[in-house]
Amino acid sequence: MSKQWKQVKIFDTFEDADTLRQKMLEGDKTEKLEVKVRRCGDEGRQFKLKAYYPKPPPDNKKKKK
């Protein structure tokens, strides 16, 4: 199954996007958060920040009545 990345914000400069990326990674205590910066917009002039946080595995135990 592929990862479902969520768009966080679009920036005009890579430096602004990278600053927020670093802050998000520093604030993550679980170290499971993944954040990436990608080019977007006309001729790749903007930068999109995307984040992925894995969902916990489902609890398959049956509930007792």
Image (cartoon, rainbow, N blue to C red):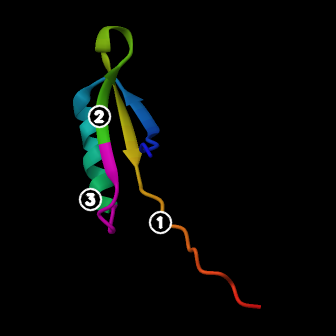
* First in sequence: mark 1 vs mark 2: 2
List the residue tagged with mark 2: 37
Question: Is residue 31 shown in magenta?
Answer: yes
Q: Amino acid at mark 1?
A: Pro
Quarter residue 47 falls in: top left
What is the residue that sits farthest to the top in this orientation? 43
| Alpha carbons under labels 1 and 2: distance apart | 24 Å
Secondary structure of residue under mark 3: helix
Report x, y in % for residue 50.
38, 39
**Which image quarter: residue 8?**
top left
Judge whether 53 appears above or below 44 on screen. below
Residue 56 — which label?
1
Secondary structure under tag 1 reads loop
Q: Position of residue 25 (x, y in %)?
A: 28, 55
User: Residue at image x 34%, y 56%?
Assistant: 33
Q: CA distance from mark 3 to mark 2?
A: 16 Å
Mark 3 vs 1, N-terminal side: 3
| Towards the viewer: 9 or 6 | 6
* Amino acid on which disc 3 is placed: Glu
Image location of residue 15, percent across then percent down: 22, 33
What amino acid is at disc 2? Val
Mark 1 closeness class: few <14, some 14–19, many ≥20 residues within 10 Å: few
Q: Classify residue 18 by image quadrant.
A: top left
49 versus 31 height, above or below:
above
Label 2 sits on a secondary structure element that is: strand
Overall secondary structure of the magenta stretch?
A: loop
Residue at which label 3 appears:
26
Residues rendered magenta in the picture = 28-35
Pointer 3: residues within 10 angstroms few (<14), some, or many (20+)? Answer: few
